[in-house]
Image (cartoon, rainbow, N blue to C red):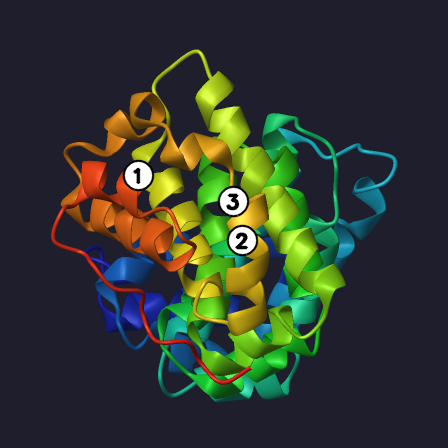
Amino acid sequence: MDPLGGNDSIENYVHQLINPLTRENALLELSKKRENFPELAPYLWYSFGTIAALLQEIVSIYPLLSPPALTAHASNRVCNALALLQCVASHNETRALFLQAHIPLFLYPFLNTMSKTRPFEYLRLTSLGVIGALVKVDDTDVINFLLSTEIIPLCLRTMEIGSELSKTVATFIVQKILLDDVGLNYICATAERFFAVGHVLGNMVVNQAQAQEMPSQRLLKHIIRCYLRLSDNPRAREALRSCLPELLRNPQFTSCLKNDETTRRWLAQLLINVGYPEAATVLANDIMAPTPLTAA
C-alpha cells in the first residue's frame, strides 16, 4: 500500500468498505484523507457495494436513537460514513445521482433526535453538513427535492435545540432555501409556514441577547439574512412590520455587528423594508429605499 496515501491507497480503502471486518478502519482513513482527493466522490459512487455499505452504517444505529443509547464510538464511526456521503453530495458529477437515490432521507432520523449529549450533537452537526453541502451550490433541483421532504421542520428543530454550531448550519440551510425563489414562495405560501420560521428566528434573536457571552456574529448573520430575504415577499414584509424582534432595532444589541459591515447593511436594509428608517440610519445612513418586492 502506498505509504503516502496516493490513489492506490484510496482505492484500497474504498474496496475495504464492503468488508465489515475492514470497514471501520477504512471509514476512518478515508474521512481523514478525503480533502486531498477531489475525485473521491465518483470512486465512492461507482465502486461496487460502497454506497450500500455506507447506508448500512447509517441504518445500523437507528435502534440507538430512541431511547437514546448512542455512544461516542458509534457516533464517530457513523459520522465518518456521513463525511464520505458529504463528498458525494458536494461533487458535481454525483450530486444529482445522490438526490435521485433519495439518500438525504436516511439522515433525517438523526435530525429528529432531541438528546443534547455530545454523541447526538456530533451526529446532528455532521448530518447537517451533508445537507449544507447540497445547498451550497445554487441549484433549484436541490431546493425542490428538499422542499418535497420535511427538511424545514427538521432544521427549525435544530435551530431551537442544537449547539451554536448546529444552529448556525441549520440556519444557513434555511437561508439558502429562502434565497431560491421556489423556497421563498414555499415558506411564504401559508401563514403557518411563515410564522413557524419567524417564530424560531425570533426566539434565536432573544436567546442571543440573553447569552452570557457576546452574541454569535456568524449565527446572527444568517438570521438577519433570512429575515431580509423574507422581507422580499409582499405578505411576509407586511407581517414582519409587527413581528420583527424589537432587539434588531436596539443599538445596544446590534452594536455587536460594528465590525461586520455586510451584516450591518443587511440589517439596515431589512429595517428600511419593514418601515423603521430611523433605526436603519444608525447602522448605515446611505440605504434609503426598500428593495423591490418579489412576485407573491
Tell me the amino acid under the disc marked 3.
Answer: Leu
The answer to whether mark 2 and mark 3 are in CB contact below 8 A is yes
Q: Residues within 10 Å of mark 3 (few under 14, many from 20)?
A: many
The answer to whether mark 2 and mark 1 are in CB contact below 8 A is no
Q: Position of residue 271 (x, y in %)?
A: 36, 49
- Using residue 272 as the reference point, say whether residue 124 is left or right of it: right
The reply to whether residue 154 is in sight is: no
**Label 3 – label 1 distance at C-alpha:** 13 Å
In terms of depth relative to the viewer, which is nearer, 89 or 183? 183
Tell me the amino acid under the disc marked 2.
Answer: Leu
Which residue is drawn at the image coordinates 37% and 46% (left, top)?
Answer: 276
Which residue is drawn at the image coordinates 30% and 38% (left, top)?
Answer: 279
In terms of depth relative to the viewer, which is nearer, 77 or 11? 77
Which secondary structure, mark 2?
helix
**Label 2 – label 1 distance at C-alpha:** 15 Å
Q: Is residue 95 above or below residue 264?
A: below
Tell me the amino acid under the disc marked 1.
Answer: Ala
**Residue that badge 1 annotates:** 279
**Mark on residue 240?**
2
